[in-house]
């Protein structure tokens, strides 16, 4: 696969020793005479004094980001340390680039049965933060109007999705299937959509464009009935989620009452050398509040029994914080959904994936972007059935009811290169299991507390790895973790299962009700803390056969 961008990052051991200062490490290499776009987070909302300080450093304010007490500014690199010396500043980071990370899909997720029972997303609105939503018959209501009730762009030069990613994602969530006689409908085909454009015609945006769009979703929540935000995008993790401005914006949206569904990333074939794709979850999917989704393959059949995890789906735990991710997996491979137009970038790049005739067609794409959209649609159905559900209750319900029956491992052979990729069905690969929409709708339990994704903690002395819930989490209540992950949350029984150079999960380590990790579930000789990892910026938006 062609990698459009490769980024060398330090290993987890180096991450544990990360500078406790207020300036992100990836700003260190900025040329002193260059102008650097950054995001400055403050302890409280910045006022005129802080703006004046930016001007005094030869910079200017590009965008206010009130949701996280921040500003997107541009300053001279030589002034970064001077600016960071302000005690009101919490953290300074680059305004980093963010990129975009239904025939068999709908029945595999259980959405077809949900539709038969009458759940279609009525009265619920989803904010799609992406490259835009083009006009398409699948987004019209029964009166010929549009179910896209609001549009706003946070990038320059944006049209009606000239890239094509956002339209496809929206179609998975809420497409009616009108242009396919109903056969290619989305998960919640009567939901309303809010189009917040944060990626340009090349599928690229910035932290600040996404943060601004998240802020707008919060502002419009009550007026437009927004309950779910879909983020089928991401970038490499470069610091703790506690400092990452993108993660902080996700947390604020979550706390405001919005379910924020995020793609896990498509780096599962890469990551650390010999690492089997572990530690490759992208930001903001590394945030414990986010509902982070990996991808499954429907194997070309409507049934779920033969489905396998996609080898490109990013695996946890997260860099810097060891957060257990993804939270669950959902269908994401070779998904057919609304095409933005024959002239959009993805249609030009993938003409063989175009389905249908005339101007109103569909496009076939694969990736955790697609899987996240499926879960956003599932969240919509839960909220339609029970409007009083909180984001934490939605997340906990989806994880608790996710199917936990998997093989111990599977392999895929890249047809172009002949390379073999092996997937182990452990908690870092499939999370709490495979999305089961009907199971979630049938479950009447109510989770109490915060459904923060837990942290994996190694014990070098015993060779055991345990999952520990955050003190602010409610997972320990009402069955909590064991309810979400199954009867055995994390039981690596082998004393030799070290969290180091020869890490393997013990031969009787049961996960969930019946899925065994198996004695051969090894990470490889340098998997745990490898010294560097080459990440592709767009790896994985492809199909697996």
Image (cartoon, rainbow, N blue to C red):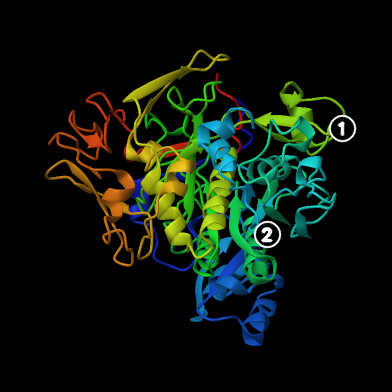
Please rate how many residues cluster around mark 1, counting C-alpha atoms within 10 Å: few if below 14, some from 14 to 19, many from 20.
few
Residue sitting at the far right: 358
Give the residue displayed 57% in from the left and 29% down from the top: 333
- Assign a secondary structure to mark 1: loop
Question: Is 450 or 204 nearer to us in this picture?
Answer: 450
Tell me if label 2 and label 1 are in contact, CB under 8 Å.
no
- Assign a secondary structure to mark 2: helix
Question: Is 37 or 400 nearer to us in this picture?
Answer: 400
Name the side, left or right, on which 450 lies relative to 374.
Answer: left
According to the picture, the residue beneath numbered tag 1 turns out to be: 359
Give the residue displayed 52% in from the left and 21% down from the top: 299
Task: Give residue 67's quadrant in the image.
Answer: bottom right
Residue 257 vertical position relative to residue 483 in the rendered view, above or below: below
Task: Give residue 487's quadrant in the image.
Answer: top left
Residue 126 image position (x, y, % from top left) = 64, 55
Q: Earlier in the sequence, mark 2 or mark 1?
A: 2
User: For the image shown, how many numbered marks are present on the structure?
Assistant: 2
Task: Give residue 59's quadrant in the image.
Answer: bottom right
Residue 217 vertical position relative to residue 370 in the rendered view, above or below: below
Residue 129 image position (x, y, % from top left) = 66, 54
According to the picture, the residue beneath numbered tag 2 turns out to be: 209
Residue 420 vertical position relative to residue 48 in the rendered view, above or below: above
């Amino acid at each position: 696969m062609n990698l459009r961008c490769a980024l060398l990052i330090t290993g987890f051991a180096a991450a544990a020793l990360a500078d406790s200062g207020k300036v992100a490490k990836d700003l260190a290499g900025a040329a002193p005479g260059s102008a650097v776009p950054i995001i400055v987070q403050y302890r409280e909302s910045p006022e005129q004094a802080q703006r004046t300080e930016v001007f005094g450093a030869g910079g200017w304010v590009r965008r206010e980001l009130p949701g996280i007490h921040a500003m997107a500014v541009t300053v001279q690199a030589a002034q970064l340390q001077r600016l960071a010396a302000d005690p009101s500043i919490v953290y300074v980071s680059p305004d980093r680039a963010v990129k975009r990370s239904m025939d068999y899909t709908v029945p595999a997720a259980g959405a077809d049965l949900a539709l038969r029972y009458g759940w279609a997303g009525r009265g619920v609105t989803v904010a799609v933060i992406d490259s835009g939503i083009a006009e398409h018959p699948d987004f019209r209501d029964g009166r010929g109007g549009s179910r896209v009730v609001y549009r706003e762009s946070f990038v320059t030069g944006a049209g009606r999705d000239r890239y094509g990613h956002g339209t496809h994602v929206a179609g998975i969530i809420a497409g009616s299937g009108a242009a396919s006689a109903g056969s290619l409908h989305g998960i919640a085909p009567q939901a309303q959509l809010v189009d917040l454009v944060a990626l340009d015609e090349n599928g690229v945006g910035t932290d600040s464009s996404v943060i601004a769009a998240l802020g707008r979703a919060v502002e419009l929540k009550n007026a437009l009935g927004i309950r779910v935000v879909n983020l089928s995008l991401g970038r490499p993790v470069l610091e703790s989620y506690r400092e990452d401005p993108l993660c902080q914006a996700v947390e604020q949206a979550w706390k405001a009452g919005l379910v924020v569904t995020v793609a896990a990333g498509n780096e599962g074939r890469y990551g650390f050398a010999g690492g089997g794709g572990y530690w490759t979850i992208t930001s903001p999917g590394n945030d414990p509040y986010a509902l982070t989704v990996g991808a499954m393959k429907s194997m070309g059949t409507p049934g779920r029994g033969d489905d396998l995890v996609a080898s490109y789906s990013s695996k946890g735990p997260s860099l810097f914080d060891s957060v257990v991710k993804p939270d669950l997996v959902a269908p994401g491979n070779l998904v057919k959904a609304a095409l933005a137009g024959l002239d959009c970038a993805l249609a030009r790049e993938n003409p063989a994936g175009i389905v249908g005739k005339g101007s109103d067609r569909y496009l076939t794409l694969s990736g955790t972007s697609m899987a996240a959209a499926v879960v956003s649609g599932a969240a919509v159905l839960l909220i339609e059935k029970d409007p009083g559900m909180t984001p934490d209750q939605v997340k906990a319900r989806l994880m608790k009811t996710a199917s936990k029956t998997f093989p111990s491992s599977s392999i895929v052979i890249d047809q172009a290169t002949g390379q073999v990729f092996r997937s182990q069905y452990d908690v870092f690969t499939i999370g709490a299991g495979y999305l089961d929409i009907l199971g979630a709708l049938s479950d009447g339990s109510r989770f109490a507390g915060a459904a923060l994704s837990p942290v994996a903690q190694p014990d070098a002395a015993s060779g055991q790895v345990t999952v520990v819930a955050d003190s602010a989490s409610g997972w320990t209540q009402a069955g909590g973790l064991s309810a979400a992950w199954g009867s055995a949350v994390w039981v690596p029984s082998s004393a030799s299962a070290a969290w180091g150079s020869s890490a393997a999960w013990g031969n009787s380590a049961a996960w969930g009700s019946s899925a065994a990790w198996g004695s051969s579930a090894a990470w490889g000789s340098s998997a745990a803390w490898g010294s560097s990892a080459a990440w592709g910026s767009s790896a994985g938006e492809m199909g697996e056969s």
